Amino acid sequence: MASYDEKVVVYAPHVRDGDSIIRLLNTRDHHAVGVTSLDGLVGHLDESLGAVLMTEEALVQSDWGALLDVIREQPSWSSYPFILLIGQHRSAGQTEAVYAMFPPEVGNVMVLERPMSTTALISALRWAIGGRRRQFVTRDHLVELERHARHQKLLTRELAHRVKNTIAMLQSIVMQTMRPYPELEAVRDLVIARFGALSRTHDLLLGTDFASADFLELVAGTLSIHEHAFETLGPSIQISPQAALSFALVLHELATNSIKYGAFSEETGSGSVRLTWSTEIADGTEMFAFAWIERGGPEVTAPTRSGFGSRLIRTTLGALGTFDIAYPADGLELRFTGELSHLTQAVVPISPRADELPLD
């Protein structure tokens, strides 16, 4: 609730004029105070203000700087209401000339011509104070929204830490469970590495409170654990947490495959892997394009069966857009295209089950 006293400041250089207005307002249950100088007015501009009444004589100022400084320093929800009481002029042009004496930076202004009825003045004042009350309602809403945002941020970070701890626990369970089976060491390392890819992506997302992830940083972080020089070329693009986790797993599987079977599997070190990504407009829709191109490894042939990694890539990319995996003899090629909105929105389409997509 608003906690101000709706003070009405009457700025009238002529004391008798100001006193008569103040007496009138006080009889109508308004808290009115009078000032005769700009400095006096500025001293009353705070959250206790309801409205300002200014007579025409107060518009004669050589420097509005003190007032403008206070106006600029208002919080975003605040706009002090001013009512200018000007004398009756013969033409609209003369009225505009008087109004033009007031600085245009003060936007919340109403002009009334004198003489006027008491009813007209009180009605205008009540309208201005009513608007001021709504400003405080807006302030209270903003404060509440900020409080909720801080609480949500705290919950998000706590959940992120718990997820990361859960991943670490799962890695430990896999290690301890498979320790007695040395023949399954390769499987153990594969599972732990996949958990590691998820964990590193959570670290990246934690830096933005799970609001988004930079695709450029995601690529760099996912590939950094490998001792191979991946060529990367693409801009910084913010994607959703869900899309980031999906692409982290895809990049991990592709990198692992390139080291075990693809371009980096040759001891000569002549192989290369090039990643590129970009955005472009197609038929009025912004699209995201990604390519993974391997060259210089052993001769490539299409696999006769699909393992978990291959199915993971297909289901994940299939949920985000369209993709093509080709197996030319000189190296694996994967190309993906999808609407950028599917990668940046809060929730991406749910991935279908692996058995709902055709295998290689």
Image (spheres, rainbow, N blue to C red):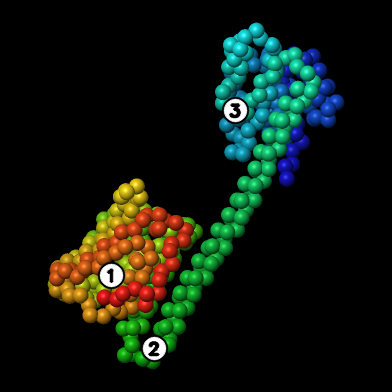
Secondary structure of residue under mark 2: loop
Q: Quadrant of residue 291?
A: bottom left
Q: In this view, does 157 lie to the left or right of 359?
A: right
Residue 271 seen in the current view: no
Q: Quadrant of residue 315?
A: bottom left
Q: Is residue 245 left or right of residue 360?
A: right
Q: In the picture, which quadrant includes the N terminus?
A: top right
The residue under label 3 is 107
Q: In this view, does 24 lie to the left or right of 239?
A: right
Q: Which of the two discs, 3 and 2, sits closer to the camera?
A: 3
- Residue 179 - label: 2
Disc with the residue nearer the chain's start (2 vs 1): 2
Tell me where residue 198 appears, x and y as whole percent.
Answer: 41, 70
Q: In this view, does 292 lie to the left or right of 6?
A: left
Disc with the residue nearer the chain's start (3 vs 2): 3
Disc 1 crowd rating (10 Å Cα; few below 14, some 14-19, many 20+) is many
Tell me where residue 31 appears, x and y as whole percent.
Answer: 80, 30
Type of amino acid under label 3 = Gly
Disc 3 crowd rating (10 Å Cα; few below 14, some 14-19, many 20+) is few
Secondary structure of residue under mark 1: helix
Secondary structure of residue under mark 3: loop
Tell me where residue 110 appears, x and y as whole percent.
Answer: 66, 24
Residue contact between numbered discs 3 and 2, judged by CB atoms under 8 Å: no
Is 35 or 117 nearer to us in this picture?
117
Distance Cα–Cα, label 2 vs label 1: 26 Å
Disc 2 crowd rating (10 Å Cα; few below 14, some 14-19, many 20+) is few
The residue under label 1 is 255
Report the residue at 60% width, 51% height from top. 146
Residue extending furthest toward the bottom: 180
- Residue 32 - label: none
Whether residue 131 is situated above or below residue 154 in the rendered picture? above
Q: In the picture, which quadrant includes the C terminus?
A: bottom left
